């Protein structure tokens, strides 16, 4: 990323000090999009603004053909990223600037992405801009606080659906240029389809990164939602659910619309601010880099939420959570927007919290906090323990840093801290503060202080101290119970807290409003002897404010000594929990006996954090998953456990024990697959676990083939599972190219082609690795999805010896990766090609491991490397160090 491409916060502030932007008119000519040879599209932007400075710049990553300033045609001054504007009126009158040029169709999911469906040859377009890629499509002031009204005018094939943030107000048919091609598909012999021009209604004031255009022969399902207004009227909102035509048979639009209406009902009441964007379209788009994006009135989602294969309840819950997350953004982020990316959390933490909260309050997924505790918070804990961790309110000096901060702290830690804030101030005060925030700052951009003022006004609490320790410091608190018994009663129960900000090194002891659960075994007869299985039930719940390094729970004195003490029961705060020795012993023997899903999830979380920290041997964690996993009823948790077990085996298990661990994992998954109820979600999770385990266990190949042959009763064999099985067979050298090609014939879809590519590159052959390396490092050779597929095949854990020769080539290529690829693709390459699969040496300090030393050497030798690149390398080194330390801690003796 060049200097002028990487807009800094200081530059953005200076531009904001001078400018007020009123409106844009953006004209896009997408009429030639179905023609593969056309790599660019005409784009014209007219922007109106006032300024107090005679010169400024527009952002545009394309080719500039013309610039008109206040009616005067001027010679374009464009460095590839910025269009310089001079001679502007500074007397308060409005300036009008028109920039004409060519934008480039994207293959990386950044800007205007173009996709050709291999099923029917149809072309599909969609935009994706966050944080700063609208400048790839039109000339704009690319920063979130310079809001304006946008009018889009799009020329495209007449048979297409064309969408933007607002409804079209005029649709004009134009004569065909040559013979018509049906449905906007790729024309033959130079023919052009009939064309149509869509002009959309002006938007309310919004940020450029939130604008959207979607175009192509999308399949559409419509609906409506309505709600009463305070003035006695009715708010009517048209709904749309869209996907590619070739996916239409898999689109469960009714179920999506049901969650949509439930969410709109909830937010309409909870926020007391009517839905502000007119319509609500939700489009599932191909080759998407994100889970979803909150474009007002035109939300885009990854196609992986259109389930082509059998899906578990946990997958439907995750999709509902994402739908509600993006819907919350219509207020948090769209109506009120962070002024700069330092306050990215103002929208993402809130939306992440609201996704789970609204799921529980408004949908069938009343257990959404269980998945949050197990999946989202695990992401936060891992991110927050890296040397690159940062406060929730981060220091974001430029756009490169902004791109890196869409991470587990901004999303999941922020959401967990908001859950703690809700416990601290009360649910009603929290929502009252949100309502005041929307009313006071609608259509504008805000900072942390604006939000705190609204919450303080509603709750009556001074949140300055709370903000300092929770939002403005980094690091994960560690909470542990210390129980002193007296006979069979509790003499003393203390919650200890450890905490330090790893950025500053200062001790930080945060205030926690939390619950401590006391659990005892009941009906503990030996089930193997025919008696009832033991059950761990909560006998007492102690709510307390933990504020220092030691907090005594006085009300515990005299209660019966429990079998398990669970700090942070109900998951009200954000902290790693260490189980005391007696509770750990109980968990080892009776974890599956916990009757409720949430406390089970919290205990599993404590065990996984202990494994990552080298306190629980990796082999023990695998054994616990195989022992207690079959009793797990929440498939989101079960899927997470099996994934964690794979990580434990591949990264945290010593090399000498890894082959046996791989076989144990695969054999255990097979046994549990056969024992599961036919057709159940649990059966499907264990089948997926077996398929993944088979990629590193050659002994499992016959079992994978048995699954493919349909020998497991009741198991749905959709394309997702089939490809996973074939990829694992390929990785252990047990699949031929003819077989993989045959599977592609069976699943001749875009996803099939992507999965086929992953399988081909998973073959354990030096020539295959070499070809994959060359493709990955060739700019523009692969689409974003195909980059991921090739990385997956290349970086197989079983192929450590095959990929070892690329270690030095990796470090030599790092600067080129960053310079030659877009930041999205460069990020994937830096992460995915890092030589992460390494073995600890018993007599060597992990810091002295050859790959760790080489990484440190690169960092020392490249002090001027872009900060975002250095961050990725630092994080990769830390993950490796953690793995090597855990391997050493897991060595016998």
Image (cartoon, rainbow, N blue to C red):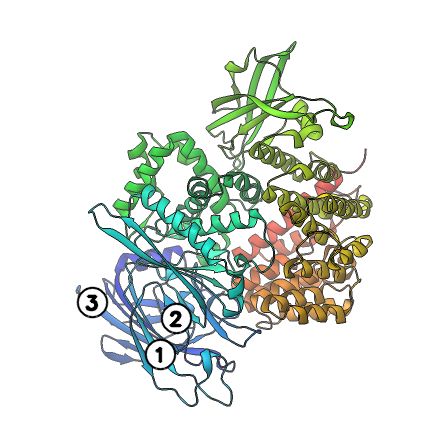
Q: Residue at x 80, y 41 (%)?
A: 843
Q: Residue at x 74, y 69 (%)?
A: 768
Mark 3 vs 1, N-terminal side: 3
Relative side of 16 to 327, left or right: left
The kind of secondary structure element at disc 1 is strand
In the displayed structure, 727 sits above or below 837; it is below
In the displayed structure, 587 sits above or below 875; it is above
Mark 2 vs 3, N-terminal side: 3
Which is nearer the eye, 71 or 103? 103
Spatial separation of the CA atoms under disc 2 and disc 1: 10 Å
Which is nearer the eye, 39 or 404? 39
Q: Residue at x 49, y 33 (%)?
A: 573
Q: Which mark is residue 474?
A: none
How crowded pointer 3 is (Cα within 10 Å; few <14, some 14-19, many 20+) is rated as some
Which of label 2 and label 3 is nearer to you?
A: 2
Relative side of 743 to 176, left or right: right
- Cβ atoms under marks 2 and 1 closer than 8 Å: yes
Residue beneath label 1, please? 196
The kind of secondary structure element at disc 2 is strand
- Cβ atoms under marks 2 and 3 closer than 8 Å: no
Query: Residue 182: x and y, percent?
Result: 46, 81
Residue beneath label 3, please? 94
Mark 2 vs 1, N-terminal side: 2
Relative side of 532 to 3, left or right: right
Quadrant in which residue 533 is drawn: top right
In the displayed structure, 159 sits above or below 817; it is below
Viewer can see residue 837: no
Q: Quadrant of the C terminus?
A: top right
Query: Residue 671: x and y, percent?
Result: 76, 45
Residue beneath label 2, please? 162
């Amino acid at each position: 990323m060049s200097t002028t491409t990487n807009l800094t916060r200081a530059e953005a502030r200076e531009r904001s000090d001078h400018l007020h932007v009123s409106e844009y008119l953006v004209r896009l000519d997408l009429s030639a999009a179905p023609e593969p040879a056309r790599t660019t599209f005409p784009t014209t932007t007219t922007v109106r603004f006032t300024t107090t400075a005679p010169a400024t710049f527009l952002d545009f990553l394309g080719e500039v053909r013309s610039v008109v300033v206040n009616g005067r045609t001027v010679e374009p001054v464009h460095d590839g990223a910025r269009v310089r504007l001079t001679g502007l009126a500074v007397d308060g009158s409005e300036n009008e600037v028109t920039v004409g040029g060519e934008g480039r169709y994207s293959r990386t999911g950044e800007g205007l992405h173009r996709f050709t469906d291999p099923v029917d040859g149809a072309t599909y377009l969609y935009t994706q801009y966050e944080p700063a890629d609208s400048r790839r499509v039109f000339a704009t002031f690319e920063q979130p606080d310079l809001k304006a009204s946008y009018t889009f005018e799009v020329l495209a094939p007449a048979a297409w659906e064309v969408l933007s943030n607002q409804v079209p107000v005029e649709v004009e048919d134009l004569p065909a240029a040559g013979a018509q091609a049906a449905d906007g598909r790729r024309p033959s012999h130079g023919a052009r389809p009939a064309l149509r021009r869509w002009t959309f209604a002006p938007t309310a004031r919004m940020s450029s990164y939130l604008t959207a255009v979607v175009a192509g022969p999308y399949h559409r399902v419509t609906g409506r939602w309505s709600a009463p207004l305070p003035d006695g009227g009715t708010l009517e909102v048209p709904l749309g659910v869209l996907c590619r035509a070739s996916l239409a048979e898999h689109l469960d639009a009714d179920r999506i619309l049901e969650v949509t209406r439930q969410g709109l009902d909830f937010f309409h009441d909870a926020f007391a601010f009517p839905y502000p964007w007119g319509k609500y379209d939700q489009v599932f788009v191909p080759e998407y880099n994100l889970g979803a994006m909150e474009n007002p009135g035109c939300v885009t989602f990854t196609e992986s939420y259109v389930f082509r294969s059998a899906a578990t309840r946990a997958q439907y819950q995750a999709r509902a959570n994402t739908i509600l997350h993006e819907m919350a953004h219509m207020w948090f982020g769209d109506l009120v927007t962070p002024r700069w990316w330092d306050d990215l959390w103002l929208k993402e933490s809130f939306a992440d919290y609201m996704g789970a909260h609204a799921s529980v309050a408004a949908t069938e997924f009343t257990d959404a906090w269980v998945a949050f505790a197990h999946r989202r918070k695990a992401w936060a804990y891992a991110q927050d323990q890296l040397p690159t961790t940062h406060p929730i309110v981060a220091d974001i000096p430029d756009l490169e840093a902004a791109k890196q901060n869409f991470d587990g702290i901004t999303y999941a830690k922020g959401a967990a801290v908001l859950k703690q804030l809700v416990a601290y101030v009360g649910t009603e005060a929290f929502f009252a503060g949100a309502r005041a925030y929307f009313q006071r700052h609608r259509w504008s951009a805000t900072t942390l202080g604006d939000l705190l003022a609204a919450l303080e006004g509603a709750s009556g609490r001074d949140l300055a101290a709370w903000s300092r320790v929770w939002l403005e410091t980094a690091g994960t608190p560690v909470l542990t119970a210390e129980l002193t018994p007296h006979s069979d009663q509790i003499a003393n129960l203390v919650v200890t807290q450890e905490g330090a900000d790893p950025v500053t090194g200062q001790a930080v002891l945060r205030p926690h409003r939390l619950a401590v659960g006391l659990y005892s075994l009941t009906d503990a007869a030996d089930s193997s002897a025919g008696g009832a299985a033991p059950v761990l039930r909560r006998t007492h719940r102690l709510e307390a404010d933990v504020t220092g390094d030691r907090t005594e729970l006085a009300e515990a004195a005299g209660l019966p000594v429990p079998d398990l003490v669970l700090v942070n029961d109900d998951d009200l705060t954000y902290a790693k929990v260490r189980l005391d020795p007696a509770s750990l012993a109980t968990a080892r023997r009776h974890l599956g006996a916990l009757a409720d899903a949430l406390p089970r999830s919290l205990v599993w979380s404590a065990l996984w954090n202990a494994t990552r920290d080298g306190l629980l041997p990796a082999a023990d964690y695998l054994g616990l998953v195989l022992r207690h996993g079959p009793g797990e009823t929440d498939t989101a948790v079960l899927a997470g456990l099996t994934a964690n077990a794979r990580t434990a085996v591949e990264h945290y298990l010593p090399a000498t024990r890894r082959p046996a661990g791989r076989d144990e994992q695969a054999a255990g998954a097979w046994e549990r697959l056969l024992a599961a109820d036919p057709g159940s979600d649990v059966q499907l999770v264990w089948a997926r676990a077996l398929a993944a385990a088979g990629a590193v266990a050659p002994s499992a190949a016959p079992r994978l083939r048995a699954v493919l042959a349909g020998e497991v009763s009741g198991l749905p064999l959709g394309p997702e599972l089939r490809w996973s099985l074939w990829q694992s067979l390929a990785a252990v050298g047990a699949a031929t190219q003819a077989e993989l090609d045959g599977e592609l014939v069976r699943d001749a879809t875009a996803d099939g082609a992507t999965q086929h590519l992953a399988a081909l590159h998973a073959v354990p052959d030096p020539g295959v690795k070499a070809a994959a390396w060359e493709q990955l490092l060739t700019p523009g050779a692969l689409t974003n999805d195909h980059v991921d597929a090739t990385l997956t095949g290349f970086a197989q854990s079983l192929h450590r010896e095959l990929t070892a020769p690329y270690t030095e080539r990796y470090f030599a290529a790092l600067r080129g990766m960053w310079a030659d690829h877009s930041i999205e693709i460069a990020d994937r390459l830096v992460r995915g090609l890092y030589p992460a699969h390494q073995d600890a040496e018993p007599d060597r300090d992990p810091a002295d491991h050859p790959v760790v030393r080489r990484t440190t050497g690169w960092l020392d030798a490249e002090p001027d490397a872009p900060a975002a690149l250095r961050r990725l390398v630092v994080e990769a080194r830390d993950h490796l160090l953690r793995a090597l330390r855990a391997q050493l801690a897991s060595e016998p003796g």
